[in-house]
Image (cartoon, helix red, strand yellow):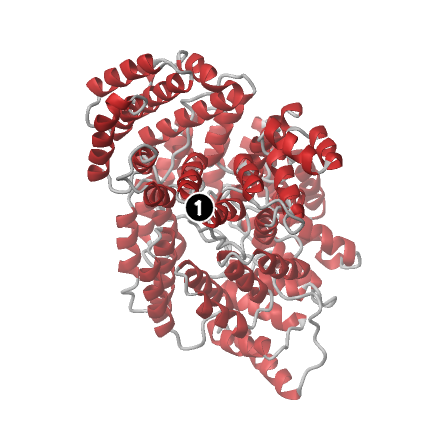
Amino acid sequence: MQRIDSVYAGSGRRSVAPSRLRVAHARRWRPAIALLLAGLVWVGCKTSEDSVIGRVRAQQLAGEYAETIGSLRELIREGTIRGEVMVLYARALAFTGHPGRSSWALDTAMEDPDWIVPAGLQLARNAYESGNYELCLRTLDRIESERPDAGELDRVAARLRAQALIGTRRHYEEALEIVEGLLDDGPDDEVALRLQGIALLGLGRIEEAESLITQAGDRSAIDEVGLRPAEGEPFWCSVRARFQRESRDVEAALVTLRSCLEADPGAPLLVREAVELYAALGQTARVLEILEAAYAADPSNRDARLALVAQLVASGLPERAEAALREATKSSEPLRAVEAWIDLAVHLVNQERVPEALEAYDHAFGGMDAEPSPELQFAHAEALIFAGRHDEALRIADTTPVEIHRPMIRGRVAFERGQHESALMAFEEAALAWPNNAPIRYYLGRSAESIGDFDRAVEEYRHALRSDPALAEARTRLVEMHIAERRVRHALAVLRFSSPRQDASPVTPKERLLEVELRVLLGQAPDLARLPNDPDRTAQEMEAAAIEAFVRGLRRRGGAQAVLVGLGTLDRTRLGAPAWDVARASRVEALLALGRDDDALAEAHRAVEERPGVDRVQISLADALAQGPAGTPKAKSIYTAVLERTPGHPDALLGLAQLARADGDIDGVALAQRALGARPGDAEILEELVDALLRSGRRDDAIAALRRQLTREAPFDGRAALRLAELLPPNAETEGERRELLLRALRFGAGEPAARRLAELDPEAGEEGASNRPSERL
């Protein structure tokens, strides 16, 4: 099951761990949504509404922001969505610690011509603060285009544009030009002076930047753009450290940061700079120390807690992360306790502990004086979907005041239920309201895949990446499709794509493994040592996964012989034991594929002698033994022993299922079904299951298994598409489906058999398919 909890998301490449779409290592929630349908307009206001709005204005002027949220939500729920109401709501959220959640309100407010400027400026500011510089600049462009007469706000917008341009780390020259214009009109503009210093650093004009930093270091900050209090003096300290770092004086940067953090360990700017530098140096223990000190300096700081939690999870310490979150739920302040319960619920969902997450949501709701916010209702609906409680999620869709949430939830439920046409329609409705929402586009692509419309899926994934280049799952899905098509250079181009105006996000583990495979397919030597941290795997497990990707690329490029040659280039002394186990097992598999059974058996015996307790090498030995009748009993014994140690091991289950062909005492169907449940989408296991079903006379079940594979788990499986086309009864009712299946099979590498079958069924389609053969598009 996959999720996008950033359906109100900004940026940050999400790596949604390998099997599920997550946020920021993929487990970070990044609120920022533009939601209401374009057709919604304010058609008038009652006197009572005016009085409520007047009271809200007065309360906010008095600093009573939290007290206004309930009134504003009630107005919105009743349909009062004019610009001022939405801006007031956004302001209330920002000053109560939830600026990201205000983005959907601000986007709606921009539809009101009288409020496009203040709403747009804050939306751009939110985007800037979340690192989505592309959205920030795009929003400023929209303000300038639709309100060229808003001259009195030019200075504020210009500052923000310069900040965003600098944030990209690519447009220093353009930013400096804007800043110099600001300083011409106001030489004492502190914000402009800051930006000038950073731009000069970016351009390598070191002496000018150092002089400016020295002069400005004791001056205080002024920030007229944001809705939140200005940042403190650590700004210049962090700039100095950045200057030293980018001047390649890393030791000086470390000295600066140590000194500054000693004086103010909780300063967000300093913490961010220090974490980035120590992470780049690979000193993850120090990163954790800094975040722990920041949190200890202010345990009530939710941002500090969430940063610490994310690092603990990334460091393989989820239990400590959970402990910090549970401790925060004991806060004596009800609002902070509610926030902590919500954060704990998110953490538990990311840990796939959905029932406990739902209990945490219940605690959060129980501590609230008012009805949960629409954003929280949406998050709750997503947890319910994970738990399979679809009807409860749909009830939220029926009652939520945020109209765009309705088709999103309904689309997610339909997708999980396998109702892909309905899911497509729901996400299309959502896309009409918010065309540039990347997660919506991602799910449109997934739904299009499920009904076999791969050209549309490609366009939807591309649209998602244009909207948010950091959405890792859209990127990897498109890369996987191109690999299956053998469009290798296309795949590599997608993997490398990033917005020219958006700072590059860290490469996710899945993307790095795909890059290894692509390099091999292009005949290049991949760097198997440069691997990112994966919170779900140890460093040695990640290295083993890289060898698996290396072998996949070799197999796709030249078959078993290429695997043997490529494995011969590996330096054993540079690999950990798990990675070498993968290499040895892959060598045995390649030797068996080439018919060199004796060599395979000898290799497997050597591997077992060296690593007798490792499941992987034991299964390799069993696979080699199973090639001859004399070795079958021993192979069966090994597979069984592996299952006793590791219940549900898919390779052991597959091995036993394959032995069932010659052993009537083994239920091959049940074994293959268990194996496929343990490793969904595996083509070899599916093929074994289909064969076992057919041997048992269960043709309809075999067809159903293939349909499940092609609609959800592995729509790019060309062999499964060919097999299903061959199993469907050849009549007029199935002719159209068989034709589409054969075109899919040809697209995804089923080769000559698919081309031949397609030509027999439809000569014209056969010619069309032949012109797009994957082998011709390497």
Q: Residue at x 63, y 49 (%)?
A: 734
Q: Nearer the viewer, residue 109 or 518?
A: 518
Horizontal side, residue 768 vs residue 391: left or right:
right
Against 700, residue 375 (above or below) is below
User: How many neighbours does mark 1 have within 10 angstroms: few (below 14), some (14-19), or many (20 or more)?
Assistant: many
Q: Residue at x 30, y 21 (%)?
A: 628
Helix, strand or loop status at disc 1: loop
Q: Quadrant of the C terminus?
A: top right
Question: Which amino acid does the dot numbered 1 rest on?
Answer: Ala
Q: Residue at x 42, y 48 (%)?
A: 27
Residue 535's image quarter?
Answer: top left
Q: Nearer the viewer, residue 211 or 730?
A: 730
Against 483, residue 596 (above or below) is above
Residue 733: percent from left, percent from top: 65, 52
Query: Which residue has dot 1 on it?
Result: 26
Horizontal side, residue 485 vs residue 99: left or right:
right
Q: Residue at x 49, y 51 (%)?
A: 231
**Residue 507 shows in this picture:** no
Against 316, residue 331 (above or below) is below
Residue 206: percent from left, percent from top: 56, 27
Residue 596: percent from left, percent from top: 37, 13
